[in-house]
Image: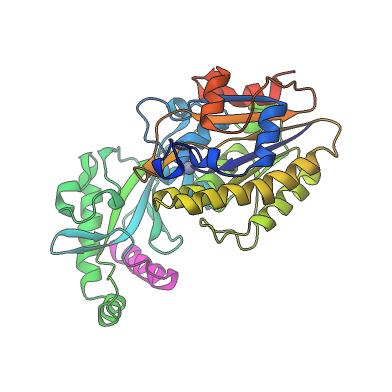
Amino acid sequence: MKYAIIIPDGAADEPLNELGGRTPLEAAHTPNMDAIARAGKLGTVRTVPDGFESGSDVATMCLLGYDPAVYHTGRAPLEAAAQQIPLSASDWIFRCNLVTVIDGIMKDHSAGGIPDSDAKRLIHDLANALNLPGFEFYTGVSYRNLLVYRGDAQFDVTTKPPHEIPDEPAGKWLPRGQGSEILRNIIERSRALFAQHEINVARRAAKQNPASQVWLWGQGHAPAMPKFAERFGVGNACMITGVDLLRGLAVLMGWSVEEVEGMTSFHDTNYVGQGKSTAVMLDRYDLVFSHIEAPDEASHQADYKTKIASIEAIDKHVVGPVLEKLKTFPEWRVLVMPDHPTNIATRKHGYAPTLFAMAGSNMESAGARAYSEPAAKAMGLHMEKGHELMEFLLRSRG
Ligand SMILES: [Zn+2]
Protein backbone atom coordinates (compact mmCIF):
# COMPACT_ATOMS: atom_id res chain seq x y z
CA MET A 1 0.00 0.00 0.00
CA LYS A 2 1.27 3.48 -0.91
CA TYR A 3 0.16 6.51 1.10
CA ALA A 4 0.43 10.20 0.19
CA ILE A 5 -0.46 12.92 2.71
CA ILE A 6 -0.63 16.47 1.38
CA ILE A 7 -0.90 19.41 3.78
CA PRO A 8 -1.78 22.86 2.40
CA ASP A 9 -0.90 24.68 5.64
CA GLY A 10 -3.62 26.99 6.95
CA ALA A 11 -5.77 26.64 3.79
CA ALA A 12 -9.01 26.25 5.76
CA ASP A 13 -10.82 29.51 6.53
CA GLU A 14 -14.18 31.20 7.14
CA PRO A 15 -16.55 32.66 4.51
CA LEU A 16 -15.33 36.08 3.32
CA ASN A 17 -17.37 39.09 2.21
CA GLU A 18 -14.74 39.81 -0.47
CA LEU A 19 -15.55 36.39 -1.94
CA GLY A 20 -19.31 36.76 -1.83
CA GLY A 21 -19.61 34.69 1.32
CA ARG A 22 -17.40 31.87 0.05
CA THR A 23 -14.25 30.56 1.70
CA PRO A 24 -10.93 30.68 -0.19
CA LEU A 25 -11.16 26.90 -0.75
CA GLU A 26 -14.65 27.35 -2.22
CA ALA A 27 -13.51 30.19 -4.44
CA ALA A 28 -10.37 28.38 -5.66
CA HIS A 29 -10.45 26.14 -8.75
CA THR A 30 -9.36 22.77 -7.32
CA PRO A 31 -10.37 19.93 -9.67
CA ASN A 32 -7.96 17.43 -8.12
CA MET A 33 -8.92 18.05 -4.49
CA ASP A 34 -12.58 17.95 -5.58
CA ALA A 35 -12.00 14.59 -7.29
CA ILE A 36 -10.54 13.15 -4.06
CA ALA A 37 -13.47 14.48 -2.01
CA ARG A 38 -15.98 12.98 -4.48
CA ALA A 39 -14.22 9.62 -4.77
CA GLY A 40 -13.83 8.96 -1.06
CA LYS A 41 -14.54 10.45 2.33
CA LEU A 42 -14.83 14.11 3.24
CA GLY A 43 -15.21 15.33 6.81
CA THR A 44 -14.10 17.61 9.59
CA VAL A 45 -11.50 16.96 12.28
CA ARG A 46 -10.29 18.79 15.39
CA THR A 47 -6.49 18.95 15.32
CA VAL A 48 -5.99 21.57 18.05
CA PRO A 49 -7.21 20.08 21.34
CA ASP A 50 -8.65 22.33 24.05
CA GLY A 51 -5.98 24.17 26.00
CA PHE A 52 -3.44 24.25 23.14
CA GLU A 53 -2.35 27.18 20.98
CA SER A 54 -3.33 26.68 17.36
CA GLY A 55 -0.05 26.08 15.53
CA SER A 56 1.51 23.71 13.04
CA ASP A 57 3.54 21.93 15.73
CA VAL A 58 0.44 20.93 17.71
CA ALA A 59 -1.89 20.35 14.74
CA THR A 60 0.60 18.32 12.70
CA MET A 61 1.60 16.17 15.67
CA CYS A 62 -2.12 15.51 16.17
CA LEU A 63 -2.94 14.58 12.58
CA LEU A 64 0.12 12.31 12.50
CA GLY A 65 -1.58 10.23 15.18
CA TYR A 66 0.09 11.53 18.35
CA ASP A 67 -2.16 13.14 20.97
CA PRO A 68 -0.58 16.54 21.79
CA ALA A 69 -1.88 16.22 25.38
CA VAL A 70 0.48 13.25 25.76
CA TYR A 71 3.40 14.10 23.47
CA HIS A 72 3.68 17.86 22.98
CA THR A 73 6.42 19.20 25.24
CA GLY A 74 7.20 22.55 23.60
CA ARG A 75 8.59 24.11 20.50
CA ALA A 76 12.31 24.12 21.27
CA PRO A 77 12.53 20.30 21.61
CA LEU A 78 11.07 19.85 18.10
CA GLU A 79 13.60 22.29 16.66
CA ALA A 80 16.42 20.47 18.47
CA ALA A 81 15.21 17.20 16.93
CA ALA A 82 15.19 18.86 13.49
CA GLN A 83 18.85 19.78 14.01
CA GLN A 84 19.64 16.17 15.00
CA ILE A 85 20.93 17.31 18.41
CA PRO A 86 21.25 14.20 20.58
CA LEU A 87 18.88 14.49 23.54
CA SER A 88 18.17 12.38 26.58
CA ALA A 89 14.90 12.39 28.50
CA SER A 90 16.14 14.61 31.34
CA ASP A 91 17.68 17.33 29.14
CA TRP A 92 16.00 20.73 28.92
CA ILE A 93 15.85 22.53 25.59
CA PHE A 94 15.23 26.30 25.31
CA ARG A 95 14.84 28.55 22.31
CA CYS A 96 17.57 31.18 22.55
CA ASN A 97 16.57 34.10 20.31
CA LEU A 98 18.85 37.00 19.57
CA VAL A 99 16.57 40.00 20.13
CA THR A 100 16.67 43.79 20.12
CA VAL A 101 15.67 45.46 23.38
CA ILE A 102 16.06 49.24 23.44
CA ASP A 103 15.45 51.24 26.62
CA GLY A 104 13.86 48.16 28.15
CA ILE A 105 11.36 47.71 25.28
CA MET A 106 11.20 44.57 23.08
CA LYS A 107 11.75 46.12 19.67
CA ASP A 108 12.55 43.09 17.50
CA HIS A 109 12.31 39.34 18.19
CA SER A 110 14.77 38.66 15.35
CA ALA A 111 17.51 41.25 15.93
CA GLY A 112 16.90 42.59 12.44
CA GLY A 113 17.02 39.11 10.90
CA ILE A 114 20.69 38.95 11.88
CA PRO A 115 22.88 36.94 9.45
CA ASP A 116 24.04 33.47 10.48
CA SER A 117 27.70 34.46 10.67
CA ASP A 118 27.06 37.32 13.12
CA ALA A 119 24.71 35.17 15.20
CA LYS A 120 27.29 32.39 15.41
CA ARG A 121 29.99 34.74 16.69
CA LEU A 122 27.77 36.33 19.32
CA ILE A 123 26.50 32.99 20.61
CA HIS A 124 30.01 31.53 20.57
CA ASP A 125 31.39 34.50 22.54
CA LEU A 126 28.50 34.27 25.02
CA ALA A 127 29.07 30.55 25.58
CA ASN A 128 32.78 31.18 26.27
CA ALA A 129 32.14 34.11 28.60
CA LEU A 130 29.48 32.28 30.60
CA ASN A 131 31.25 28.93 30.80
CA LEU A 132 28.27 27.47 32.66
CA PRO A 133 28.50 23.75 33.40
CA GLY A 134 25.71 21.72 31.78
CA PHE A 135 24.66 24.42 29.30
CA GLU A 136 25.36 23.97 25.58
CA PHE A 137 24.48 26.53 22.90
CA TYR A 138 23.54 25.45 19.37
CA THR A 139 23.37 28.02 16.61
CA GLY A 140 20.65 27.71 13.99
CA VAL A 141 19.43 29.94 11.19
CA SER A 142 19.74 33.67 11.91
CA TYR A 143 18.28 34.63 15.31
CA ARG A 144 16.92 31.11 16.00
CA ASN A 145 19.38 29.44 18.36
CA LEU A 146 18.95 26.76 20.97
CA LEU A 147 20.23 26.25 24.50
CA VAL A 148 20.39 22.71 25.86
CA TYR A 149 20.83 22.02 29.57
CA ARG A 150 22.15 18.66 30.68
CA GLY A 151 22.36 18.80 34.47
CA ASP A 152 20.59 18.39 37.78
CA ALA A 153 18.86 21.75 38.12
CA GLN A 154 15.07 21.58 37.94
CA PHE A 155 12.98 24.00 35.93
CA ASP A 156 9.33 24.88 36.32
CA VAL A 157 9.30 28.19 34.52
CA THR A 158 6.91 30.40 32.59
CA THR A 159 8.41 32.09 29.54
CA LYS A 160 7.04 34.26 26.74
CA PRO A 161 7.67 34.09 22.97
CA PRO A 162 9.37 37.41 22.07
CA HIS A 163 7.29 37.79 18.87
CA GLU A 164 4.19 38.00 21.10
CA ILE A 165 5.41 41.03 23.07
CA PRO A 166 6.44 43.63 20.47
CA ASP A 167 6.91 47.11 21.97
CA GLU A 168 6.22 45.80 25.48
CA PRO A 169 8.57 46.17 28.47
CA ALA A 170 10.87 43.14 28.25
CA GLY A 171 11.43 43.11 32.03
CA LYS A 172 7.77 42.27 32.57
CA TRP A 173 8.12 39.02 30.63
CA LEU A 174 11.40 37.58 31.89
CA PRO A 175 11.34 33.87 32.88
CA ARG A 176 9.56 33.26 36.18
CA GLY A 177 9.32 30.29 38.53
CA GLN A 178 11.61 27.54 39.77
CA GLY A 179 15.05 27.75 38.13
CA SER A 180 14.31 31.09 36.46
CA GLU A 181 17.16 32.89 38.23
CA ILE A 182 19.70 30.88 36.17
CA LEU A 183 17.90 31.88 32.96
CA ARG A 184 17.59 35.54 33.99
CA ASN A 185 21.29 35.51 34.78
CA ILE A 186 22.14 34.24 31.28
CA ILE A 187 19.93 36.92 29.72
CA GLU A 188 21.45 39.65 31.95
CA ARG A 189 25.03 38.63 31.19
CA SER A 190 24.33 38.53 27.44
CA ARG A 191 23.11 42.12 27.70
CA ALA A 192 26.34 43.24 29.33
CA LEU A 193 28.51 41.28 26.89
CA PHE A 194 26.68 42.30 23.71
CA ALA A 195 26.35 46.03 24.56
CA GLN A 196 29.69 47.03 23.05
CA HIS A 197 30.35 43.89 21.00
CA GLU A 198 31.95 44.84 17.69
CA ILE A 199 29.20 43.11 15.73
CA ASN A 200 26.61 45.37 17.35
CA VAL A 201 28.79 48.45 16.88
CA ALA A 202 28.85 47.62 13.16
CA ARG A 203 25.11 46.85 13.05
CA ARG A 204 24.20 50.15 14.72
CA ALA A 205 26.51 52.02 12.32
CA ALA A 206 24.71 50.30 9.40
CA LYS A 207 21.31 51.26 10.92
CA GLN A 208 20.49 47.62 11.58
CA ASN A 209 18.87 46.37 14.77
CA PRO A 210 21.60 45.21 17.18
CA ALA A 211 21.39 41.83 18.91
CA SER A 212 21.22 43.47 22.32
CA GLN A 213 20.66 40.23 24.27
CA VAL A 214 19.36 36.67 24.16
CA TRP A 215 15.79 35.69 25.07
CA LEU A 216 15.00 32.23 26.46
CA TRP A 217 11.59 30.60 25.84
CA GLY A 218 9.74 27.60 24.34
CA GLN A 219 11.40 25.19 26.79
CA GLY A 220 10.68 21.52 27.28
CA HIS A 221 12.07 18.01 27.44
CA ALA A 222 12.41 15.92 24.32
CA PRO A 223 9.02 14.33 23.60
CA ALA A 224 8.96 10.58 24.16
CA MET A 225 7.21 9.78 20.88
CA PRO A 226 7.15 6.13 19.85
CA LYS A 227 8.42 5.65 16.31
CA PHE A 228 5.71 5.75 13.63
CA ALA A 229 6.65 2.22 12.52
CA GLU A 230 6.05 0.85 16.03
CA ARG A 231 2.79 2.68 16.33
CA PHE A 232 1.28 2.08 12.91
CA GLY A 233 3.38 -0.61 11.23
CA VAL A 234 4.40 1.67 8.35
CA GLY A 235 8.11 2.32 8.69
CA ASN A 236 9.35 3.42 5.31
CA ALA A 237 8.20 7.05 5.32
CA CYS A 238 9.50 10.50 4.46
CA MET A 239 8.56 14.12 4.99
CA ILE A 240 8.95 16.98 2.53
CA THR A 241 8.64 20.39 4.22
CA GLY A 242 10.32 23.77 4.48
CA VAL A 243 9.51 24.09 8.18
CA ASP A 244 11.91 23.10 10.97
CA LEU A 245 9.21 22.11 13.47
CA LEU A 246 7.86 19.53 11.03
CA ARG A 247 11.35 18.23 10.24
CA GLY A 248 11.73 17.69 13.98
CA LEU A 249 8.53 15.65 14.11
CA ALA A 250 9.82 13.55 11.21
CA VAL A 251 13.11 12.83 13.00
CA LEU A 252 11.29 11.90 16.23
CA MET A 253 8.98 9.52 14.33
CA GLY A 254 11.93 7.84 12.61
CA TRP A 255 11.11 9.23 9.15
CA SER A 256 13.50 10.44 6.47
CA VAL A 257 13.49 14.12 5.52
CA GLU A 258 13.71 14.98 1.81
CA GLU A 259 14.61 18.44 0.48
CA VAL A 260 13.26 20.16 -2.64
CA GLU A 261 15.27 22.88 -4.34
CA GLY A 262 13.59 26.28 -4.22
CA MET A 263 11.14 25.34 -1.47
CA THR A 264 10.14 28.38 0.63
CA SER A 265 7.39 29.31 3.09
CA PHE A 266 5.82 31.71 0.59
CA HIS A 267 3.95 31.76 -2.74
CA ASP A 268 7.29 31.94 -4.57
CA THR A 269 7.93 28.32 -3.54
CA ASN A 270 8.74 25.62 -6.09
CA TYR A 271 5.30 23.96 -6.33
CA VAL A 272 6.23 22.05 -9.49
CA GLY A 273 9.41 20.69 -7.89
CA GLN A 274 7.57 19.67 -4.75
CA GLY A 275 4.88 17.86 -6.75
CA LYS A 276 7.48 16.00 -8.84
CA SER A 277 9.53 15.10 -5.78
CA THR A 278 6.48 13.87 -3.84
CA ALA A 279 5.52 11.63 -6.79
CA VAL A 280 9.08 10.30 -7.23
CA MET A 281 9.44 9.57 -3.51
CA LEU A 282 6.39 7.29 -3.70
CA ASP A 283 8.64 4.84 -5.58
CA ARG A 284 11.12 4.87 -2.71
CA TYR A 285 8.84 5.16 0.31
CA ASP A 286 5.53 3.59 1.36
CA LEU A 287 4.33 6.87 2.88
CA VAL A 288 5.17 10.38 1.68
CA PHE A 289 4.09 13.45 3.66
CA SER A 290 4.25 16.68 1.66
CA HIS A 291 3.69 20.00 3.43
CA ILE A 292 3.31 23.41 1.75
CA GLU A 293 3.44 26.51 3.97
CA ALA A 294 2.33 29.16 1.43
CA PRO A 295 -1.45 29.37 2.17
CA ASP A 296 -0.68 29.98 5.84
CA GLU A 297 1.71 32.86 5.13
CA ALA A 298 -0.77 34.46 2.70
CA SER A 299 -3.44 34.26 5.42
CA HIS A 300 -1.15 35.98 7.94
CA GLN A 301 -0.80 38.79 5.37
CA ALA A 302 -4.63 38.93 4.96
CA ASP A 303 -3.97 38.40 1.24
CA TYR A 304 -6.90 36.29 0.06
CA LYS A 305 -5.90 36.52 -3.61
CA THR A 306 -2.50 34.99 -2.94
CA LYS A 307 -4.13 32.44 -0.66
CA ILE A 308 -6.43 31.32 -3.48
CA ALA A 309 -3.53 31.31 -5.95
CA SER A 310 -1.44 29.13 -3.64
CA ILE A 311 -4.33 26.68 -3.11
CA GLU A 312 -4.76 26.44 -6.90
CA ALA A 313 -1.02 25.93 -7.40
CA ILE A 314 -0.99 23.13 -4.82
CA ASP A 315 -3.99 21.49 -6.50
CA LYS A 316 -2.46 21.67 -9.97
CA HIS A 317 1.23 21.07 -9.28
CA VAL A 318 1.22 18.83 -6.21
CA VAL A 319 -2.14 17.06 -5.78
CA GLY A 320 -2.60 16.40 -9.52
CA PRO A 321 0.76 14.72 -10.24
CA VAL A 322 0.66 12.80 -6.96
CA LEU A 323 -2.80 11.43 -7.77
CA GLU A 324 -1.60 10.35 -11.23
CA LYS A 325 1.39 8.60 -9.68
CA LEU A 326 -0.68 6.85 -6.98
CA LYS A 327 -2.94 5.35 -9.64
CA THR A 328 0.05 3.44 -11.06
CA PHE A 329 0.20 1.36 -7.85
CA PRO A 330 -2.26 -1.49 -7.19
CA GLU A 331 -3.09 -0.26 -3.67
CA TRP A 332 -2.95 3.35 -2.57
CA ARG A 333 -4.52 5.99 -0.43
CA VAL A 334 -4.33 9.78 -0.35
CA LEU A 335 -5.17 12.32 2.37
CA VAL A 336 -5.44 16.06 1.73
CA MET A 337 -6.00 18.34 4.71
CA PRO A 338 -4.93 21.71 6.09
CA ASP A 339 -3.35 21.19 9.53
CA HIS A 340 -5.50 24.00 10.98
CA PRO A 341 -7.48 27.00 9.66
CA THR A 342 -5.69 30.31 9.27
CA ASN A 343 -8.25 33.08 9.00
CA ILE A 344 -7.85 35.97 6.57
CA ALA A 345 -10.20 38.09 8.71
CA THR A 346 -8.04 37.89 11.85
CA ARG A 347 -4.67 37.05 10.22
CA LYS A 348 -4.36 34.36 12.90
CA HIS A 349 -4.56 30.60 13.19
CA GLY A 350 -8.12 29.47 13.92
CA TYR A 351 -9.44 26.95 16.42
CA ALA A 352 -12.34 25.55 14.37
CA PRO A 353 -12.04 21.95 13.16
CA THR A 354 -10.24 21.67 9.82
CA LEU A 355 -11.41 19.53 6.88
CA PHE A 356 -9.99 16.34 5.40
CA ALA A 357 -10.55 14.29 2.28
CA MET A 358 -9.22 10.80 1.69
CA ALA A 359 -9.60 8.45 -1.23
CA GLY A 360 -7.90 5.41 -2.72
CA SER A 361 -8.20 1.86 -3.93
CA ASN A 362 -10.76 -0.01 -1.80
CA MET A 363 -12.46 3.20 -0.73
CA GLU A 364 -16.00 4.00 -1.74
CA SER A 365 -17.53 7.40 -2.37
CA ALA A 366 -19.59 8.91 0.42
CA GLY A 367 -21.19 11.30 -2.08
CA ALA A 368 -19.41 14.59 -1.36
CA ARG A 369 -19.69 17.33 -3.98
CA ALA A 370 -16.49 19.37 -3.59
CA TYR A 371 -13.47 20.01 -1.38
CA SER A 372 -14.55 22.87 0.90
CA GLU A 373 -15.41 23.64 4.52
CA PRO A 374 -19.20 23.86 4.01
CA ALA A 375 -19.20 20.67 1.91
CA ALA A 376 -17.21 18.89 4.63
CA LYS A 377 -19.58 20.06 7.37
CA ALA A 378 -22.56 18.89 5.31
CA MET A 379 -21.19 15.33 5.20
CA GLY A 380 -21.69 14.91 8.95
CA LEU A 381 -18.43 12.96 9.34
CA HIS A 382 -16.57 14.59 12.24
CA MET A 383 -13.60 13.33 14.25
CA GLU A 384 -13.30 15.16 17.54
CA LYS A 385 -10.00 13.48 18.40
CA GLY A 386 -7.69 14.41 15.55
CA HIS A 387 -5.03 11.91 16.61
CA GLU A 388 -7.42 9.10 15.64
CA LEU A 389 -7.46 10.20 12.00
CA MET A 390 -4.16 8.47 11.11
CA GLU A 391 -5.48 5.13 12.30
CA PHE A 392 -8.55 5.77 10.13
CA LEU A 393 -6.38 6.52 7.08
CA LEU A 394 -4.08 3.52 7.51
CA ARG A 395 -6.56 0.90 8.67
CA SER A 396 -10.05 1.66 7.42
CA ARG A 397 -11.37 -0.51 4.64
CA GLY A 398 -13.92 0.76 2.16
ZN1 LIG B 1 0.21 25.32 10.17
Q: Is residue 123 magenta?
A: yes
Q: Main secondary structure of the magenta part?
A: helix
User: How far across and down, in percent of the image, does residue 358 sit?
Assistant: 67, 29
In this rendering, would 240 be left or right of 188? right
Q: Using the image, determine if residue 293 lies above or below residue 58.
A: below
Q: Residue 62 versus residue 340: which sits nearer the camera?
A: 340
Q: Residue 30 versus residue 147: which sits nearer the camera?
A: 30
Q: Using the image, determine if residue 227 lies above or below residue 131.
A: above
Q: Using the image, determine if residue 151 lies above or below residue 188.
A: above
Q: Is residue 344 magenta?
A: no
To which quarter of the image does residue 284 belong?
top right
Q: In this orientation, does residue 222 appear?
A: no
To which quarter of the image does residue 232 belong?
top right
Q: Residue at x 68, y 49 (%)?
A: 316
Q: Residue furthest front?
A: 20
Q: Which residues are magenta?
A: 112-130
Q: Quadrant of the N terminus?
A: top right
User: How far across and down, in percent of the image, does residue 30 sit?
Assistant: 63, 42
Q: Residue at x 28, y 52 (%)?
A: 162
User: How far across and down, in percent of the image, does residue 230 sit?
Assistant: 66, 28
Q: Residue at x 46, y 52 (%)?
A: 298
